[in-house]
Amino acid sequence: MSRYNPKVSEPKWQDRWNKAESFKAAPHGDKPAYYVLEMFPYPSGKIHIGHVRNYAMGDVVARYKRACGFNVLHPMGWDAFGMPAENAAMQTGSHPATWTYSNIEAMRGQLKRMGLAIDWSREFATCDVEYYRWQQLLFLKFWEKGFAYRKESLVNWDPVDMTVLANEQVIDGKGWRSGAPVERRKLSQWFLKITDMADDLLDALDDGRLKGWPENVKLMQRNWIGKSKGLQMKFRFADGISAPQGFEDGVEIYTTRPDTLYGASFIAISPDHPLAAHYAQTDEKLAGFIGECQKTGTSEEAIEKAEKRGYRLPLDCGHPFDDRKLPVYVANFVLMQYGTGAIFGCPAHDQRDHDFASKYGLPIEWAYRPDDAEPVSDEVANRFREKFSISPESVLGNPQSDDVWFGDRQFSVNYTPYIPPLGPNDYNSNHIYRKFLGGDDIAVHPGDAITAAIKKIEEMGQGEGKTQYRLRDWGVSRQRYWGCPIPAIHCETCGVVPVPEKDLPVELPEVDAEEFKTPGNPLDRAEGWRNVACPKCGGPARRETDTFDTFIDSSWYFARFASQPGDAPVDKGTVDQWLPVNQYIGGIEHAILHLLYARYFSRAMKACGYLSVEEPFENLFTQGMVVHATFRDENGAWLLPEEVIIEKGAARRADNGAPVSIGPIEKMSKSKKNVVSPDHIADTYGADAARWFMLSDSPPERDVEWTDAGVEGAWKLVNRIWDACEPAADALKAHDFSKSPTDIDEPGLALRRTTHAAIAGVTDDIDNFRFNKAIARIYEFLNALKKTPPMKKPGGEPANGVKAEAFAQAEALSVLARLIAPFTPHLAEECWAALGGEGLVCDAPWPKADPALLKQDEVTLAVQVNGKVRAQLSVSADAGKDETEKAALSLDDVQRHTDGKTIRKVIVVPGRIVNIVAT
RNA sequence: GCGGACGUGGUGGAAUUGGUAGACACAACAGACUUAAAAUCUGUCGAUCGUAAGAUCGUGCCGGUUCAAGUCCGGCCGUCCGCACCA
């Protein structure tokens, strides 16, 4: 008996697949197309086991779909532009291109060792000129269509990376890569008008276009887009106020709660508001205040600690409905980026406004004042108390007014917009919701009050209903070298001019590696490249030195994988045949940024006639991470798992035996060194064992902890499968399986049933992305297979010339080889070949379960007495209720438990259970 | 604060969507083989009581619906994730 040797087998089969071009996506023929894609990697240096998990999942899908008769596209490439390459250049002095391409080289080799069914002929890196030149063309088209524009804007400036960050790249007020606190600066930037598509991006989440996406991702995108309906209105200045020039109209605010207008007590504008800037010119104290506000971090912590602070402007606004005067403040909590950068404060209905009003002694008035309120009944009051957990001691009713209040939190019944209402009959709505806006406008529900308020303001000509989005336009300028140059030229006379299409690509200039040691953008200093003639007037001009955000690179790569013509970004006919991606797989960390941008890009490309789909990813799967314990030596230095030996729960260094402390289990990261190299695993156990382990046990969407024991278990399985196939091989080869037996004996039939149940189960599990369960089923199948007597050389001659048991066993092994093929492809090929299978197993059709063999003749039911299982009952699968009931009642165990009792009821659920109710 | 997900043996996790809780695997323990170890194979493996047959309890906690609840409903507790001075 020979031992399975992955070191020999794996390269051998990879070579065969390669020579046969097994995984090259065919030009479209009669087979249906299936496009499976994993988010392409950033070439950071080395593949780690987390990548392996990601790509193994895609590979299962790719191989499975291929076996099912699809023409599968499963490509791979590199998201190759970005900061780390420049950081490496800074530290090591090697050029970003050199660094990137050598990483790609190394990582490609590592991926190939994993035996992935990838069409490598389509591979590219986003830093290839042949890719980014078409990205530049796309941008020109977008610009032409008005999707791209330039504007002066406050930007998030990362002082360490010396670049602008998109809002999405600022996490807790810090740069997503550098971790440095972000500053605010004003710069002229390129933007893509993603907000124009906000409605469609939002609608598609709900109208079924993304039914193949996980709910949590859709929810995150929904929140991110943040659509809200409200009122945009002007608060005119009060009589006697002389408005500054240019601001005569008053202060424009946005609110989603116009129903609280009666409670308005002040106006607050953002420190970044033009009106604030106007006064700051002449008011040094204000200028100082604004400066301080801008310094305040935007981190969670800073926000929580930050006091509500305001600076009183010499301005008052008039209330639209009565003669109140509202003071105007510059307030540190008002954001310029949202709405109009100004609000009205309603302290009675908003905690934040309340804080502010309390501090500055501003009036606090309820927006809903019941002129005709009656005290609510005790019963209603009790319902409210119960519903909102308000302590019973809380006062009901307010002696000073007829208003009705609850508890020390000063909730009022009139506060209902923030309290979900009870049923319509729980209270007298007329006294909960007061007359609103006077006259005949009786607002019964908060929604009606909002509508009424908007109507009123519109009639008064002071504003209009408006929808706001939290989503802002996508700033795509980056002041970096290692990115796709933005194809624009700045001319002194013509302004910003697009680079003519014929002059594309705008290639990155050669820059000495030493240049990267100077902070800032090397492109700014590349005089020869930067200074050009204006394409319009021929006068002196300079190139745009910003490069694109790398999220642009990853927003259309999937289309380029599908179609790579030499004269266009994509060929529409070809790309339409493949898109949308049928199955996209990647990490949850891309739930918002990448996936939203790619959705936007598809829409923009569609508008420019490049594609026909607006949703690029039909089904999305977000897989969990691979996590691992962390290790540190006595000096606190991180250690690689390979450098540590664990015995009886204690860890020590492999080289000198010094003690090692075991830290928490965390996401694998380079800095904490808790990474596992797939090379090391492939050397010891083979790629198949690594793939198998990554897919077993944990559900794919959940995190999985890498353990040595786990991969050893997988390695054992590889050998168990080989041990099942190899000894049977010779015997099976000698047998004629072209005929199936007409009569089959019981052991043979039992095995066939098991085999076909395994086919049905594994197929269903793969279809539903339950790889861990598919693997459990393969184990069950293998265990059952091993329990049947080992194959003997075919002897004895049944009537039709085929020995039944041999047939069943041959079928089982042949099925086994095909079922494991998506998971452990090399082992599957080796088994397939040993068993005398035709061609390569990766070309073999997926086995089909025979429905006749899935049907059970006899089923075992649990028999309960009063809900407790007391006996097992075997009945034929089509036994009637009466028959089953009778059989159940006659069981000894049942009689024992019903003895002396009266049988009240018998519930029979055919195929499931019998429950006898006896008292 | 707002929104969402989840809570099952020593561990990772199953449970046909209301029908035998703990599939499958890891770890552990015992046995076989071996001079020995490794590998392999066989068995045990939720808790308590019992020699056993068996009984009782058991899916974060409390309560409810049902012949039947891990699953459904109400209320707590806890963990994780997303968003957040968003007006």
Image: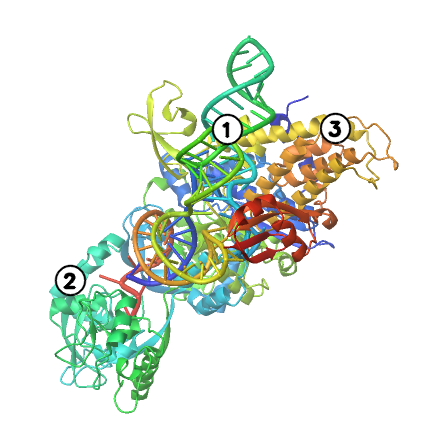
Residue at x 13%, y 70% (from the top left corner): A312
Q: How far apart are labels 1 and 3 at the CA level? A: 37 Å
Q: Is residue A618 visible?
A: no
N-terminal of the two: label 3 or label 2?
Answer: 2
Residue A315: assigned label: none
Q: Chain of mark 1?
A: A
The residue tagged 2 is A289
- Secondary structure state at the residue bearing disc 3: loop
Q: Position of residue A81 (x, y in %)?
A: 45, 47
In this rendered view, identify the residue nearer to me: A537 or A481.
A481
Residue placed under numbered mark 3 in the picture: A791
Position in image of residue A184 (x %, y %): 27, 57
Q: Identify the image quadrant of the N terminus of chain A.
A: top right
Please state the chain letter of the residue tagged with numbered disc 3 in the rendered image: A
Which residue matches tag 1? A680
Residue A451 image offset from top left, x and y in percent:
35, 81
